[in-house]
Amino acid sequence: MNDSSRAAPPRAGYRGPSDQGPVQGAAPAGPAYDAHYAQQTRPMPIVPGAPEPGGGRPDGGGTARPGGAPAGDGTFPEQTPQVPHPAAPQTQNPVHMSDAPQPAQPQKKSAGRDLGAAIGVGVGLGVVIIAALFVVKAVFVGVITAAVVVGLWELTSRLEERKGIRAPLVPLAVGGAAMVIAGFVRGAEGAWIAMALTALAVLVWRMTAPPEGYLKDVTAGVFAAFYVPFLATFVALMLAADDGSWRVLTFLLLTVVSDTGAYAVGWRFGRKKLAPRISPGKTREGLFGAVGFAMAAGALCMQFLVDGGSWWQGLLLGLAVAVSATLGDLGESMIKRDLGIKDMGTLLPGHGGIMDRLDSLLPTAPVVWLLLVLFVGTG
């Protein structure tokens, strides 16, 4: 046999028709190769401008394949996996241009609540309150009493849910209603007596339950009795005067105007936080807005609504209302932060609960009552 008939030795990795075993050091090919690599590889992203596998060499040759065989010689057909371009990101899922992050668009300031619902509910409450205030005084006393009972229910419910404090609601509700009525009928003396009896009733009522937690429960009960019905009693004291309806209207208007001024100015010009750890939304600019709006409204109300009042008294009254309303709002914000809640309830759409509307009114009531007594007497 001459040299011309002698077969050339197979190249490394060559797999001929009669070659049934793998060559050592060569990459497998064919279906077995596909099944093995299909489980350990994942589709790579298509990078625009990257050379396609098998066609990226300037001399026209194919891309190098496993085992050293060049492309296009039939040794490794289409089953050979594509080698990604070095610049291609090694991500599991291709990132399409539509999924790329877009530049942030400037957002408009938001009140954080349903403003339409808040305005509608506020107007509705205003109509009901003014109608009750000028029709029959006793009807308005009923409105105060209802607000007190619902407020106590909200407060005691949140205390039990969030802190496990069980302030007795029954003696608080009965005593709270008695406080408001006694204040209207018997004056400040009647309100103080009703407050003392309510605190005593809380202590006795809680004795019917196990002693565990007694101290914290009665402490919370006495606090609730003072915070909601006792402070609300000063509205009934204002109402008892001859021009009581106008005094109460002045009190309500100044508190609402103060809150509105704080919101409007703070939303538009607010930059410096007033008490960021308590209420991040309140600003110093908002406080100045509350003072300015309340002082202007106070001058008008004292001049035209309250018998014997003058505009300069209204300026002082408006300043005091702005401060007390802001402190009252911050005080309830402190309670809600301690409880870990945003609102005390959900009874009023756009506002939260009754207590979320009483937060500014309750501490402002004794301030307005006292200043009106000093300026124009008890009436």
Image: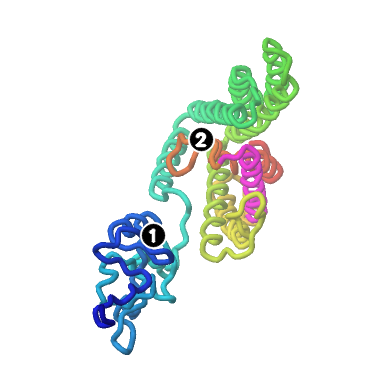
Q: Percent x, y for residue 343?
A: 53, 40
Q: Amino acid at mark 2?
A: Gly
State the residue at coordinates (58%, 55%).
281
The quadrant of the image that shows the N terminus is bottom left
Residue 68 in the magenta stretch? The answer is: no
Question: In which image quadrant can residue 34 be found?
Answer: bottom left
Q: Main secondary structure of the magenta part?
A: helix
Q: Which residue is mark 2?
A: 345
Which quadrant does the C terminus fall into? top right
Tag 1: amino acid: Thr
Q: Is residue 318 magenta?
A: yes
Question: Which of 243/357 is in front?
Answer: 357
Is 145 positioned to the left or the right of 125 in the image? Answer: right
Crowd around label 2: few <14 · some 14–19 · many ≥20 (10 Å): many
Say whether disc 1 or disc 2 marks the residue closer to the N-terminus: 1
Quarter of the view holding residue 214: top right
The residue sitting at 24% across, 79% down in the picture is: 5
Magenta span: 315-341
Q: Which mark is residue 177?
A: none
Name above or below for residue 243 compared with residue 25.
above
Q: Residue under circle 1?
A: 41
Residue 379 or residue 372, whichever sits in front: 372
Q: Judge by depth and name the residue closer to the eye, 262 or 45.
A: 45
